[in-house]
Amino acid sequence: MTDHASAMEDVELADVARARGAHPRSAPPHSQAGHILLDGSATPRAPLARRPYAGGDGTAERAPFERAAHRPRVQSIRFFSGHYHRLLVLGAFEAMVVAAAFYAALAVRFQEWTLAAMEDAVGPLWPRVLCATAAMALCMGAMGLYQLRQRLAFTGVAARVLVAVVLAEVLLACLFYAVPPLFVGRGVMLLMAPVAACGLLIVRRAFTRMFDGEVFKRRVMVWGCGDEASTIGTRLRRRSDQRGFRIVGYVQCPDEAVKVPSPVSIPGRAELMHYIAQHRVEEIVVAMDDRRRGFPTQFLRECRMLGVRVRDIVSFLEHESGHVNVELAKPSWLIFSDGFRCDAMRASGKRAFDIAVALCVLVLSSPLALLAALAIRLEDRGPIFYRQERTGQHGRLFRMIKFRSMSVNAEAGGAVWAQRDDPRVTRVGNFLRRTRIDEIPQALNVLMGHMSFVGPRPERPAFVEKLGANIPFYMERHFVKPGITGWAQVSFPYGSSEADAREKLGYDLYYVKNHSLLFDLMVLLRTVEIVLFRVGSR
């Protein structure tokens, strides 16, 4: 029986135990905000909606629920469900800024102030505007400016916007050279760059101030105040981590140690429902340390009927951080959660995407690969390529191909983790690793079907056996093909220990659960940022 089913079965037993009488609990002193304590009661407890108060007919008990049900709830503003609504709004505004900058540059350059006159001067405008906005969006994404959890200060954002504008200008120059009918002149491109940069910076600043406001945050109440509830404050401690929600309170469960600050006492369930209506709670996160004791089935059912969303702590942390907490996850989460899709259409689309990207990488990087091979050969006369056994999809072994970056007999004593400033790495190999050039030959593994371009990083069988025995859910990462790059690689620095592997596994499980072509494209864009800023390589 799963943990989830066991918890559901034990709910009825807990209700019976409470009906027989519970020891009263004393409430802690009131404080400013945040923590809600439900006092126990020595009187029998019937199901929530039917338990009468002193009046005997249940009207006093039902009144708070009826008021909450009929009271209009003012919710936070959300344009689309999910996390991507902010990025869609931001991308739309920035596309309009780039298009306006393009038209302004045309007007100044040709002294034409109507669209018809501009088209007479340079030809149809819409394909040129589309190319300009697409190139800018691509370069902005490659600079990491469309991350869901942006942690850069505004100065860092401004620097990356300027780099993205320069890269977009270079990309457009190459495009106009390859397709001459789209060319609009160097003067237009030079005028567009500063106007677009200023406009993008203004939009970014306004966007940050506007979407950091309370009106765009979901109002969340946490059911629990112990170890599981405290992970919200530790895992999502940064301001950037909490842009999508605001915690309005915690509820203490019976016999649960308090691990969160600022307690506030609320004496009963009716008052709690009034609190939910008063504070416009939109979501309840169940974070009980022991769900077999006092699971609030009736209360949560009432909340669902009022339109309040209910989910568990693992799903909440996954949604907000892009990471699965393997310490809190239970088999029931894996069984009942959405995602983990695998169908013929998705697999064939991903395979076509992998082949197309691998061929492009091999063709475009061939001059660089030839120079790397020559440098490796000249340094120590050793072999150019290094083949190493790795664990692939469903545990199948394959030999991964890389440019050799270590000395010839670097692992004569057995497999060990790579370390910072590893003495086994050659001078040429150090450069190849920092620029990720050593991974170019892995595109051949992609073409052979051993790997995907995006996926969990393949590990060596010796490490897999050890990590699989010590880390829960570790073997589940092998249900998709391993990748050259992946969500864990772009979200977490290079790992060199079991603790790092445990942390990266959370990102790998998030990818396995949510992988799609759009997700793969986002990871590829983030990889460009990693390569340019040399983050995480050793």
Image (cartoon, rainbow, N blue to C red):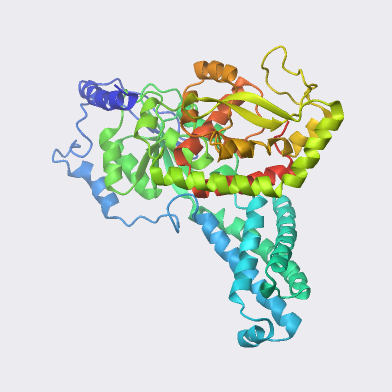
Relative to 385, is 174 above or below?
below
Quarter of the image with the C terminus is: top right
Residue 110's spot in the image, x, y percent?
74, 84
* Residue 256 placement: quadrant: top left
Relative to 195, is 12 above or below?
above
Q: Is residue 305 left or right of residue 392?
A: left
Residue occupying the point 55% across, 16% down? 466
Nearest the viewer among 137 and 1 is 137
Please give the count of numbered marks on the rendered protein: 0
Nearest the viewer among 17 and 2 is 2
Q: Residue furthest left?
A: 57
Nearest the viewer among 538 and 393 is 393
Residue 331 seen = yes
Residue 234's spot in the image, x, y percent?
56, 32
Q: Is residue 264 left or right of residue 439?
A: left
Relative to 63, is 508 above or below?
above
Residue 320's spot in the image, x, y percent?
50, 42
Residue 532's spot in the image, x, y percent?
73, 46
Residue occupying the point 31% across, 26% down? 40
Residue occupying the point 52% across, 40% down? 322
